[in-house]
Image (cartoon, helix red, strand yellow):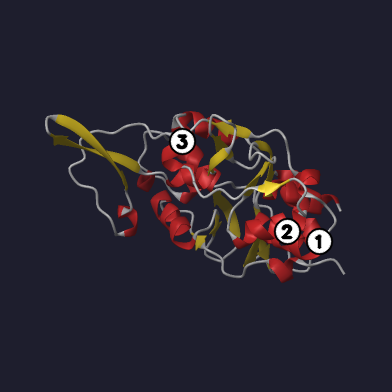
């Protein structure tokens, strides 16, 4: 029997109400390490979804001059909510995600109330469990992907991420070897500042990553701000894979390490392709 949504969905669902502000939504995403939050009415029926993409678009494009604590969930949420029931197959969930280009589905009871959520990560986990030995990484990985130099500005990186189907940008060195990955999460949660101090008559710049939204580190005496670069926000611990590896093992690596992409490299370590959960979901949808 094909695996069912009930076997892979998460029942721990983060819910916000339409009137709650976007700063609160962003804080919940950080605290719970999730990429989407369901917006529900007072009857716990979904009326919208807010994803990392929605936050990035709100900050950089739709409301660039508005503080996010003045924006409500209803201002930025996607209203055309696709849902699924627990008894449906993983394949059916993957088909909906692929058709509508979305990364997660609220799982609802027969009365429409929220029961859980299933995401690309859950589909990837199912793939790791049920597709061993059926595909190699090269069978699924794509050769069209977004690449940035470590010194590209964040605005250029954001444009690249918006064009990539999985929202991933691989940062490579001068030899074409991957040294970092930037995701929509990195763009949505970037809060980097620089403090200027005088040392022996010269300016010294010290990078500070602000975490004051979590009530921890505080930034003081900030005098000057600079545009962050790709190297400032990229995840540096890049896990790579060979094209000859089992795709199910690649899926397991992504789930185990909580990452959404694996750069595929040749024998010299140069980037040749990219495997993401997006490609895995498409395969599950087609089987």
Does residue 37 appear left or right of residue 82 in this picture? left
Q: Secondary structure at mark 3?
A: helix
Above/below status of 87 relative to 57: below
Residue at 14% across / 35% down in the picture? 198
Q: Which residue is mark 3?
A: 230
Q: 249 or 269: nearer the eye?
A: 269
Above/below status of 146 relative to 233: above
Residue at 61% across / 33% down in the picture? 146
Q: Secondary structure at mark 1?
A: loop
Residue at 67% across / 55% down in the picture? 120
> For the N terminus, which image quadrant?
bottom right
Please tell me in which quadrant of the rendered image residue 12 appears.
Answer: bottom right
User: Which residue reaches farthest front?
Assistant: 268
Q: How many angstroms separate mark 1 from mark 2 (CA)? A: 7 Å
Q: Label 3: few (<14), some or many (≥20) within 10 Å?
A: many
Does residue 113 appear left or right of residue 188 in this picture? right
The numbered dot on residue 234 is none
The numbered dot on residue 132 is 1
Contact flag, marks 3 and 1 (Cβ < 8 Å): no
Does residue 57 appear left or right of residue 192 in this picture? right
Q: Earlier in the sequence, mark 3 or mark 2?
A: 3
Q: Earlier in the sequence, mark 1 or mark 2?
A: 1
Q: Label 2: few (<14), some or many (≥20) within 10 Å?
A: some
The numbered dot on residue 249 is 2
| Viewer-side label of 3, 2 | 2
Q: 100 or 71: nearer the eye?
A: 100
Residue at 73% across / 71% down in the picture? 7
Where residue 182 sits: x, y (%)? 52, 42
């Amino acid at each position: 029997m094909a695996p069912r949504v009930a076997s892979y969905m998460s029942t721990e669902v983060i819910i916000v109400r339409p009137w709650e502000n976007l700063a609160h939504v962003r804080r919940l995403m950080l605290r719970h390490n999730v990429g989407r939050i369901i917006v529900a009415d007072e009857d716990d029926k979904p009326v919208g979804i807010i994803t990392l993409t929605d936050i990035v678009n709100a900050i950089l494009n739709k409301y660039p001059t508005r503080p996010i604590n003045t924006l409500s969930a209803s201002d930025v949420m996607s209203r055309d909510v696709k849902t699924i029931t627990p008894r449906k197959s993983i394949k059916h969930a993957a088909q909906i995600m692929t058709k509508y280009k979305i990364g997660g589905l609220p799982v609802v009871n027969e009365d429409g109330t929220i029961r859980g959520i299933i995401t690309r990560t859950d589909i990837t986990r199912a793939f790791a469990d049920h597709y061993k030995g059926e595909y190699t990484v090269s069978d699924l990985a794509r050769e069209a992907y977004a690449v940035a130099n470590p010194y590209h500005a964040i605005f250029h990186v954001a444009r690249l991420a918006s064009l990539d189907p999985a929202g991933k940008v691989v940062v490579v060195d001068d030899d074409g070897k991957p040294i970092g990955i930037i995701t929509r999460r990195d763009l949505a949660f970037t809060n980097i500042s620089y403090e200027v101090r005088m040392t022996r008559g010269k300016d010294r710049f010290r990078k500070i990553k602000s975490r004051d939204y979590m009530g921890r580190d505080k930034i003081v005496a900030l005098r000057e701000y600079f545009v962050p670069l790709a190297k400032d926000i990229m995840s540096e611990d890049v896990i790579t894979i060979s094209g000859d590896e089992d795709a199910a093992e690649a899926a397991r690596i992504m789930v185990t390490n909580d990452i959404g992409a694996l750069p595929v490299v040749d024998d010299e370590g140069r980037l040749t392709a990219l495997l993401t959960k997006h490609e895995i979901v498409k395969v599950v949808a087609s089987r």
